[in-house]
Amino acid sequence: MSNCILYVGGLAEATSDCQLRDLFGAYGAVVHVHVIRHKHSGKSAGYGFVEMGSGEQARHAVSWYPDWSLQPEPTRYSFFLQISTVASI
């Protein structure tokens, strides 16, 4: 079995690792999450990475993309996803 890394772009400044983990966790096993942050402000740089337990789980999460929301109010940002497979060690 191999893990699958998703690139997630278009994130709001306040997006946290925890929020992404919770969002993707509803669709499968989340191995690792990392929101890239600005060095000085600590705010999200607008993108991050989510490592899922398998390509199938990642595809399942991506298939539900239109229903995602990280904030209670509708937002104008969007997610851009790219799937790449990583061999497990």
Image (tube, rainbow, N blue to C red):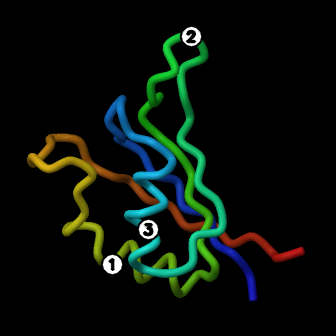
Using the numbered discs, state the Cα–Cα distance from disc 3 to disc 1 in whole angstroms.
Answer: 11 Å
Quadrant of residue 65 within the rendered picture: bottom left
For the residues labelled 1 and 2, the Cα–Cα distance comes to: 35 Å
- Amino acid type indicated by mark 2: His
Q: Which residue is mark 1?
A: 63
Instruction: Measure the alpha-carbon separation of dots 2 and 3.
Output: 28 Å
Q: Residue furthest top?
A: 40
Residue on which the image places disc 3: 24
Instruction: Name which of mark 1 and mark 2 comes first in the sequence.
Output: 2
Secondary structure category for the residue under label 1: helix
The amino acid type of the residue labelled 3 equals Phe
- In the drawing, what numbered circle is on residue 8? none
> In the image, what residue occupies the spot 56% across and 10% down?
40
Contact between marks 2 and 3 (CB within 8 A): the answer is: no
Which residue is drawn at the image coordinates 47% and 51% (left, top)?
18
Sequence-earlier tag: 3 or 1: 3
Q: Nearer the viewer, mark 1 or mark 2?
A: 2
Image location (x, y in percent) of residue 13: 36, 29
Look at label 1 and name its amino acid: Ser
Quadrant of the image occupied by residue 83: bottom right
Task: Pick whichever of labels 2 and 3 is earlier in the sequence.
Answer: 3
Kindly identify which residue carries mark 2.
40
Q: Secondary structure at mark 2?
A: loop
Label 2: few (<14), some (14–19) or many (≥20) C-alpha neighbours in 10 Å: few
- The correct choice, above or below, for 56 with respect to 22 in the image is below
Query: Residue 51: x percent and y percent?
Result: 62, 64
